[in-house]
Image: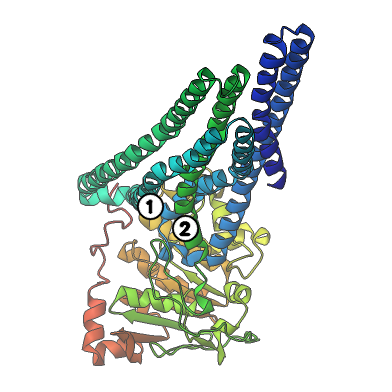
Amino acid sequence: MLRGSLLGTAWMVGLSVRPWLIARAVDDGLRAHDTRALWLWVAAIVVAGVGLSYLGIMRHRTMTFIREDAKARSAAVLLRQLSRIGAVLPRRVAAGEVATVGGSDIDWTAQVLTLTGPGVGAVVAYAVIAVVLWSISPFLALCVLVGVPAVGLVVGPLLRRLERAESVYRQQQGALTARSGDIVAGLRVLAGVGGRGLFARRYAARSRELLAEGYRVGAVNSWIDAATVAIPGLFLAAVVWLAARMAVTGDISIGDLVAVYGYVATLIVPVWFLLEGGHQLIRGRVAARRIVALLDLVPDDVGGPRTGPGGRGPGPVPGARRPEAGSAPARPADLHDPVTGLTVRAGRLTGVAADDPATALALADRLGRYVAGDVTWGGVPLTGIPLDEVRARILVADHDSYLFAGALRDILRPRPAGGGGRPGPGTDDDRIVAALRAASAEDVADALPDGLDTPVDARARTLSGGQRQRVRLARALLAEPEVLILVDPTSAVDAHTEARIAERLRTARAGRTTVVLATSPLLLGRADTVAHVHAGRIVATGSHADLLDRDPGYRRLVARDSAEPGAERPADAEGAFP
């Protein structure tokens, strides 16, 4: 940036050299009828033009490097932040917001940095031209010194209005992008329940609102673009008119008139850069606020989440500090959540039936350390254990977790980072087949043309909802974590398949800690212990059969998910819609 500023200053100041050279050619060559002097000044003009061309090329190259380097660095910082927040990110920020920030916002902030070179040069050139004009006419110099700030005062209100309009537009754009992603992701479900037309109309309405807001931004932009061209042109005309009047009265020479015209015409370049810089700076500030809001998000284990763009949750707990680092239990140990009062016994299959799905999700996040909490593991605060160790030994498996594109074998193979007990490359087909059987997903691989080697697109949209859910469950089982927390793992499969999964899951996870958050009686019936959570607290614990006998609330809760074969399943259930 220092090099760009030096080159930009040399280029801008160099632009004012040629009018002086032309004035000398007029006065010392043409008016004096001195051919030798005329050729010397012409040669100097040519040399100056070549030098200015070189400086302009180098300035542009430097500014382009700064812009592209800033994009790459900003993208790297953003990606590190997104990976640091991890799987909790979708609950904190809308996908459309991330896409907008990672796309256009980074570009706008990088554009601002390219203004440093010509921006510094414009200020210096403005001062140099004012000094040179003072040597010709103090009156003209004062006109320039007063006129340029006046131009800024005229454009300033438009820039402030643009900042407000741009902020609203960018927020609405991010929200609409998120909505479009949600619609595309759930298109099959919407088609099945007949909601595609309704959501299409809602999207069209929001799109029209965004279009109207875009016209507002465009109107302000058009005025600014017009002003950056028209105002310097009017300023040039006024100064040249004054100089011509002074030349007529003999206050300045013809050469000085030519020089004044050249100086003021040259001054248009720095004035334009300053106006355009203000325009770019406003857009960059709007974009930078959105980027900083995303970078300002912190993992919830550092004392609570901060609300970011599209985020939810409280702000940082006042006075909260990062817990002291501790050691994870050397052997399997109990997990305890004081919020609900749940204690997960090591090596046991624990079922949790919550009357509010949001309560179950919050519990899973606390047990997996995706949100701040006072969960202990073997008596040690979970937030005091190194996060990498928590991720390697405790796995929270959502029923809608992301499936990346690739061969089915690669999708199932657990990754070493972020929740795998065994290294991925060592996963053999026997273990994969065993995990598929435990998840009752053998038919998924068998139905594909090339079996485990069949490519599957992102989110596995070519599979049904029930098939995707079983693939996710098999992937979680293959990871073989010490503690596996399953969130409603059979919500999209039929009752017969669910019964097989319940039986095989208990066998596959024998002797290891497993938590199943669901209201399915088939799953809960296989659990060693079931906890009924009502209004955020455990109200009863025991076996499934015991709770059915003595807890009416539990009985009503699990009755909503009947285990009768052929019972209705959710709209995204396997086989519900072709």
Q: Residues within 10 Å of mark 2 (few under 14, many from 20)?
A: some
Measured as percent of width and height from the top left, residue 499 is found at 36, 69
Disc 2 and disc 1 in contact, CB within 8 angstroms: yes
Foreground pick, 510 / 158: 158
Residue 282 vs 357, above or below: the answer is above
Residue 167: give its label.
Answer: 1
Residue 452 vs 53, above or below: the answer is below
Residue 365 vs 327, above or below: the answer is above
Q: How is the image coloured?
A: rainbow
Measured Cα–Cα span from mark 2 to mark 1: 9 Å
Residue 498 figure quarter:
bottom left
**Residue kind at label 2, given as amino acid type:** Arg
Q: Give the residue at mark 2.
A: 289
Q: Residues within 10 Å of mark 1 (few under 14, many from 20)?
A: some
Element carrying mark 1: helix
Measured as percent of width and height from the top left, residue 315 is found at 42, 75
Q: Residue drawn 39% across and 42% down? A: 154
**Residue kind at label 1, given as amino acid type:** Ser
Foreground pick, 7 / 184: 7
Residue 204 figure quarter:
top left
Residue 157: give its label.
Answer: none
Query: In the figure, is residue 336 to the left or right of 31?
Result: left
* Residue 438 at least partly seen: no
Foreground pick, 437 / 493: 493
Element carrying mark 2: helix
Q: Earlier in the sequence, mark 2 or mark 1?
A: 1
* Residue 428 at least partly seen: yes
Measured as percent of width and height from the top left, residue 254 is found at 59, 17
Q: Residue drawn 71% across and 47% down? A: 2
Q: Residue drawn 26% across and 84% down? A: 554
